[in-house]
Image: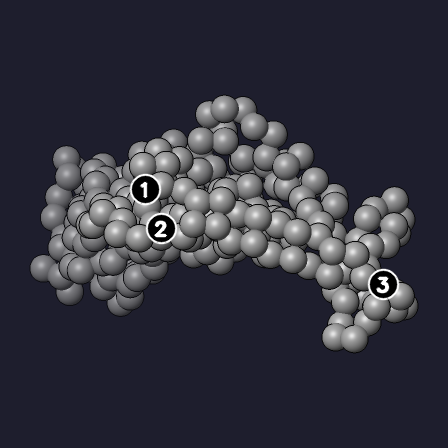
C-alpha cells in the first residue's frame, strides 16, 4: 500500500463531482428537448475504481491505485438509463432571459459556488426556490466546505442582484435643461436607469449637494434643483440609481445650456 499523499479524496467529493457533471448533461438534454425529440439513449454505464481506502482524522479518504500497485480495493458504480420523458419531468427548465447563472456571478466565492452546484443550484432562480422552501443554505454550504465557507440568503441576494445589474448596466444618452415648478430641471435620457423600485433610490447630487428626483424610470430621470446649485463651468452630477449602480457625469452651467 502506498504512503499517504496530499491528493487523497473523499467518496463524497467524488460523488459530488460526478453528480455535477450528470446534472450538466441532463440540463443540456432538457434544452435540446425544446427543439427536437431525443433520437437515442445511453443504456447503462459501468465504472470501476481501484483505490486504497484510508481513515484519516475521522474521515474515510481514498488514493487511486497507480499502474502496477497491488492490494487495491475495487469500488464499482453503475449508471442506469433514462427516458426523454424522465428528463423532461425531472430536469430543470431551460434558462430564461431574466435569470442569471451562478457561473456568471463573479463576486461569489468559488467554494460557495461549487458547493451550491453540487446540490443542483445553478442559477438565481434555483436560489429563490431554496429560499421559498426555507432550506438552510448557510448550513448546506458549511457542510459541503467542511465549515470553511458560510453564506446566507441576504448575502447571496446582494451578490446576485449586483451581477444582474452588471448585465443591465445603465447608459446615459442625452441631457436637457428645463423647469419644474419654480426650479430648474435636468432631464436625463438613457437606458436601464431606474429599472426597479428600491426604497430610498434613486439619490442624486450636484456638486455634492442633494437634489430632488422628480421622475424616475428605465429610460428617463428628471432632477429638480435651485438655480444657484449650478455654477459656471462643469458641475459634477452623481446619481445612485440603486444599491448596485451609480452614474457620474458633468453638466455645464445654465448660461451655457440656454
Report, in whole angstroms, how far the alpha carbon at label 2 lies from the one at label 1: 8 Å
The mark nearer the N terminus, 3 or 2, is 2
Side of 253 relative to 68 (left or right): left
Residue ranking furthest to the bottom: 68
Q: Secondary structure at mark 3?
A: loop
Q: Which of 104/29 is in front?
A: 29
Reply above or below: 67 against 183: below
Q: Residue 257: where, in percent of width, then height?
A: 13, 61
User: Would you say the residues marked 3 and 1 are in contact, meaning their CB atoms lie under 8 Å apart?
Assistant: no
The mark nearer the N terminus, 3 or 1, is 3
* Residue receiving disc 1: 84
Q: Which of 252/108 is in front?
A: 108
Tag of residue 71: 3
Residue in view at x 44 percent, y 38 percent = 126
Report, in whole angstroms, how far the alpha carbon at label 3 lies from the one at label 1: 42 Å
* Residue receiving disc 2: 41
User: Would you say the residues marked 2 and 1 are in contact, meaning their CB atoms lie under 8 Å apart?
Assistant: yes
Amino acid at each position: 500500500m502506498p504512503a499517504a499523499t496530499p491528493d487523497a479524496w473523499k467518496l463524497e467529493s467524488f460523488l459530488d463531482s460526478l453528480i455535477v457533471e450528470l446534472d450538466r448533461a441532463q440540463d443540456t438534454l432538457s434544452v435540446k428537448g425544446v427543439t427536437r425529440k431525443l433520437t437515442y439513449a445511453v443504456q447503462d454505464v459501468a465504472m470501476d475504481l481501484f483505490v486504497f481506502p484510508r481513515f484519516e482524522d475521522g474521515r474515510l479518504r481514498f488514493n487511486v491505485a497507480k499502474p502496477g500497485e497491488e492490494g487495491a480495493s475495487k469500488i464499482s458504480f453503475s449508471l442506469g438509463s433514462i427516458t426523454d420523458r424522465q428528463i423532461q419531468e425531472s430536469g430543470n427548465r431551460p434558462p430564461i432571459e431574466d435569470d442569471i447563472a451562478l457561473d456568471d456571478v463573479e463576486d461569489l466565492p468559488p467554494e460557495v459556488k461549487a458547493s451550491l452546484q453540487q446540490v443542483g443550484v445553478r442559477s438565481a432562480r434555483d436560489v429563490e426556490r431554496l429560499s421559498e422552501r426555507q432550506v438552510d443554505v448557510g448550513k448546506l454550504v458549511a457542510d459541503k466546505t467542511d465549515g470553511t465557507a458560510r453564506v446566507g440568503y441576504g448575502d447571496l441576494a446582494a451578490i446576485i442582484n449586483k451581477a444582474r445589474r452588471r448585465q443591465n448596466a445603465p447608459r446615459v444618452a442625452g441631457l436637457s435643461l428645463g423647469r419644474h415648478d419654480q426650479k430648474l430641471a435636468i432631464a436625463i435620457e438613457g437606458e436601464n436607469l431606474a429599472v426597479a423600485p428600491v426604497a430610498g433610490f434613486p439619490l442624486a447630487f450636484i456638486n455634492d449637494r442633494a437634489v430632488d428626483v422628480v421622475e424616475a424610470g428605465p429610460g428617463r430621470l428628471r432632477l429638480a434643483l435651485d438655480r444657484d446649485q449650478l455654477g459656471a463651468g462643469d458641475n459634477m452630477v452623481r446619481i445612485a440609481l440603486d444599491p448596485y449602480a451609480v452614474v457620474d457625469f458633468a453638466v455645464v452651467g445654465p448660461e451655457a445650456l440656454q
